[in-house]
Image: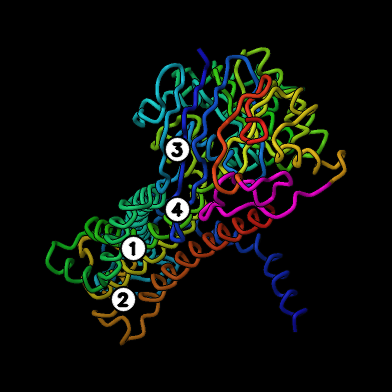
Amino acid sequence: MKDSISCKAEEIRKICPSVSKVGLLLFASFIIMALFAPMISPYDPWARFVPYSSPSLEHLLGTNDIGNDILSELIFGSRTSIVVGFGAAILATLIGTMIGLLAGYFRGTTDEILMGITDVFLMIPTIPLVIILAAFLSPSFWALALIMGALWWTTVARVVRSRALQVREMTFVESAKSLGFSNAHIISSDVFPNVFHVVLPKFMLTIASAMIAEASLSFLGLGDVTMKSWGMMINFAFSRGGFLNGYWWWYLPPGICITLFVCSVVLLSFSLEENDEMTMRIE
Amino acid sequence: MSLLNIENLSVSFETSVGLVKAVDDVSFKVEKDEILALVGETGCGKSVIANSILKILPNNARIEGKIIYKGDNILKMDEKDISSIRGREISTIFQNPSLSLNPAYPVGWQISEPLRVHENAPKKNSLTVAKKLLRRFGFVDPDHDVDMYPFQLSGGMNQRVMVATSVVLNPCLIIADEPTTGLDRSLIKEVVEEIKSIQKTNGSSVLLITHDLNFARAVSNRIIVMYSGDLVEIANTSEFFKEPRHPYSKALLKSMPENGFVPIQGSSPSMIHEPSGCKFHPRCPKKTENCSIEKPKMFRSGNGMVRCRLFA
């Protein structure tokens, strides 16, 4: 029994590099797709052709109810999804890292106040709040990224704090203090570089969950109607009879894209964490 | 005037089990250009003295007395003034060199960091200084070694990097806190040479904290023996090893392997409920009745001082 378990661990480790390669490949291809959308996409996503046409050489993935080319929509839609994902993740990671570093490094009252605020934010149910805010504010994907970023920094803050608590007790921090460096200098050059490796995987996972949240909100009809996004495409496919009539080329591709992109991000963050554990083991 | 003058320093820590008296009414001086060794068993308060000189004690510490450095009382200084002394005037060599270096930066960067922070030296110049220091401390290829990370170097090399970091700003006083812990014989020999060379070339004083008596003997000019937060003997190193005065010092020397490996009877006293009178009396072979009642003063004896009634 024990043997088989260690065997499995061994196998996983062997596959690991290829897992991270697959993740990286997928991730990179989606990023390239978003960056060079106007060059890659065969048509303008707003241009109209014959509606409801099934996949053909002319329209590789067919057209939707108003005659937009699905492939072009898909390629341009990646921009919205990725911008929302990255925007939310960058904001959340920035806030979370700052708060975690300050709380973990200074401890005491600072820690208690900041962690108290974190607990309050953790209590707020994100998706319902985003739904309410999206309903009241004009739904734009910038607002979506902003709201999610402003709510999701809590886990980053907690992870960073706990690592900072460890690092602040290490001898090189004490030696930096005895060399007369300021707190700001110690945080930025001694503590931060040594918590960075826990921030990166968290950052990736936040991208993934922000993208899923964007897709679900768009599907619920709370997204930005003027923007092409994967969630919006599924929403239209659902509300305009794509599902009922079995136009699979309309709703399947955006669903697959969301799944693949989120998978690639998760795979990347797993391999980052695995790398991290490897180095820990070597230490 | 002596470089550092510690007067009636007492440090205690408030803990959940009671007040721990780590350092009890300690006074001594560090002169210019000398290497002073502070020896004693673990937990006798050596490192607490070192940390109170740099004011890096934890928040639950209560400090009384005076630590006068070049005429100013360090204990009265605010954080900003003490920061300008740390590293520039007084620097430290920590125990366990591999853990005292930041794993995220190359060693050259770390050696030159004090220059950039305290003197606003440009990056290029500061790295040149780092290379010079690496060469001085026996690195064969400094151009290559400045870019190495601490985990790529051996413990002994890291030790030399630590020493280089602490002398980069030419401090007047270097506190070496157990610099030989975890090092083997040949590396200890290296550290001896390094400390002597710092003292010679930079003209810095060194306060050496150690429990390794042989190391203290090889390096220091004067020696201070501590027992359970008390100073028990101050003597010149050569005299001390020829003729220790305090019964504790005698017992300590006898416990060295080359002197017969005779352990000291009993165990170190609690720092919370201290023994009455002389703290060493429960373990002392020469105790009298008076010893358990009244704590002896420091008595002058020859060139040194000793806290024992036998020398009254």
In whole angstroms, how far apart are the C-alphas of marks 4 and 2? 83 Å
Residue labelled with disc 1: A73
**Residue that extends furthest to the left in the rendered view of this protein:** A136
Q: Which mark is residue A186?
A: 3
**Image-quadrant location for residue A33:** bottom left
Residue labelled with disc 2: A52
Residue labelled with disc 4: B19
Q: Nearer the viewer, mark 4 or mark 2?
A: 4
**Residue that extends furthest to the front in the rendered view of this protein:** B289
Q: Nearer the viewer, mark 4 or mark 1?
A: 4
Q: Is residue B119 left or right of residue A233?
A: right
Q: Earlier in the sequence, mark 1 or mark 3?
A: 1
**Image-quadrant location for residue B79:** top left
Q: Which residues are magenta?
A: B262-289
Q: Is residue A264 above or below residue A32?
A: below
- Labels 2 and 1 within one chain: yes
